[in-house]
Image: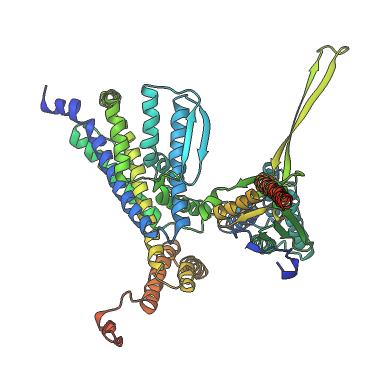
Amino acid sequence: MEEDELLDQEHVEEILSPHPLSFMGLQSLCIFLILWGLIFGWLVNFSDFSGPFNNNALLQIAVWSLVLLVVSVIASIIKVLWRLFFLYLAVVLIAIGCTYWLSLFESVSVFLPVYTVVVSIIGFLMVEWFRRSHKYIISNQRIVFKGGIITKEQRTLRYDKISDINTKQGIIGQIFGFGTIIPISQSGFGLGSDQSFAGGGVQGGATKKVGFFGFFGGGREVQTPRTRSYYELHGVYPFKDIKKVVETLVQGSVSTPYLQKQVEYQEEQRDFQEEQRDLQKEMRDLLKKQKELTQTIEEEE
Amino acid sequence: MSGEAIDVVLFAPLAPIFGLVLFWFIQLLFIEFQKGLLNQLRGTHDALIKFTNFIGIFFQTICHALGYTLTHSGISSFYLSVDYGKVDPKKKKSGVFEWLVNMFLFVGPFFLPSFLLLAYFFLLSESGLPLRAQEVFTFAENLIVFGSNLFQFTSNFVVFIGTIDLFHPAYAGFFILFILLGLGIRPSYIGKKTMEKVDIFYDLKNIRYNILHKPLYVLLGLLIAYLFSYVNVLFNQSLYVAVFSFFGWSSILAIFALIYAEVLLFWIYVLDDLPNGFRIIALLVLPISYIILRIVFYMFSWPLAAEIGFWGSIGITSLITMLLLHQLTNKFKTLFTLNSVPRMSGGKK
């Protein structure tokens, strides 16, 4: 964070980035590609099952593509993220396009494994680039989240606007000591939703003339803490310490202790005013006595 | 009743049980040795300690859950973390079911994961089940057949694991699972705030409690074993020893996994003496040398590629590690080389 970006009386407590293993979801897509590339290379070149693949480029492309697409569909359903499917589809289409335009049908048993491994290495580099684009600045007044490779996104969240803090720590996070902290703002920023739908149909009436068909269904939406990695403290290390820092800063900015201090101050002021009033009364009494004394002396004279 | 009859009726069924207990105890000793190695790595390799602990807790929790499932208790909650695992049943059963669940919890982790790996090994191996048939059912014969089954399996397994082809995905998968089993057969500790140390005494204490708590069930188990043995004698079968041989094989597999894992841990421990960059070089030597050796052997069509690739890469790695230790640290320095170090002002070398 630049000096000129700091507010009045603001100082930076921590500057953080996500842990290298915190994007394991994306990295596992690349790991799968590497594994599949190596297994496919072994399958079509060295294994006992290589017979049907010999000189049959179409079968090789079909098996290679099918496995990738099936896995991507399963991953998309599990993660509820169809982007994964389209990503793998793009990988498959580019491979088919290259094979066709560069006439690589003869050497497809070498090209496809090499291509898969190269794509996965590029994928790893892109994930790392994406990870490095994240920056979280925790100051004494706010948290600034920065991220994005091409389009730069930034979110600023003041501690008094945080209504809830959600934390997540997976198994790899527990092992390496990193985790995700999602500060949910009063406006609900930081909340996503899980949607589930169910449907069913029924057909009645066995006769040809009379029959009916009905379809019914329903859906449910559950609010859940979820946001993009550059709007949360994604995979920060050391998780426990950072969590404590954030919670302490949030606690320090909530209105209750502030109001309590104000009440104490007002009570002090009231006591002071009472003391002043007593003093004024005493002064008045003294002046009165002085006046009386002066009057008595004058009468005697 | 002749002496042999008494032997068959009274003592013969005990032979494979004794054999199994012996191998299980050897397994326990190897686990204890591994715990010692892991303790040496504590502080410098906390992530590795947590990882091995997680595998151990995972095995234990799965075994516990399996116990509840098999006793039809159901599972109401399943919690698993790096430090702690917990399974709660839907209906809490007492008596023999509770005892069985506890046996799954305390004894299961020693055998069940290795049992699964054993099944994987038999799928890969072409040698088949090395079971010896028997005609006599005395204590000595049962012990000999049990020992023979174990010996045959061990020979097959040593050949398999010593000549494993890591370029074959199924074999590479087996090797990874094998190392994972060795690293985390038992957790090092349980609990986050109040850590309970899991060592040989912890395991023995739990098992002793479970046995002494309900001795009747142990007697019942023994009775079933005796009856099974008599049925075998009656039908002239060697299934009784074969069943115990399966457990013995899983124990041997676990012992080998522990040996490999201990070598790996020892290597990591030794590498700690090296500066960071050289440590990474030493770590990379193992896979790179394996790949290079395999490619060279494949290109020139030399025989024994897998065997020489595996042992050659281990040899090269050991050699380079020792060379690095010799050059960069005081390890492997002789008295003569130390004497040649110039004396410092305090008289110390």
The image shows residue B246, relative to residue A239, as above or below, that is above
- In the figure, is residue B3 to the left or right of B89? left
Q: Quadrant of the N terminus of chain A?
A: bottom right
- In the figure, is residue B243 to the left or right of A261? left
Number of numbered discs visible in the structure rendering: 0
B277 or B247: which is nearer to us? B277
Percent coordinates x, y for residue B217 in the rendering = 30, 24
Q: What is the quadrant of residue A210 in the picture?
A: top right
Percent coordinates x, y for residue A157 in the rendering = 73, 53
Give the residue drawn at x 36%, y 56%: B39
Whether residue A263 is visible to the viewer of this picture, yes or no, is yes
Q: What is the quadrant of residue A195 in the picture?
A: top right
Percent coordinates x, y for residue B2 in the rendering = 11, 24
The image shows residue B284, relative to residue B192, as above or below, that is below
Give the residue drawn at x 47%, y 24%: B72
The image shows residue B17, relative to residue B272, as above or below, that is above
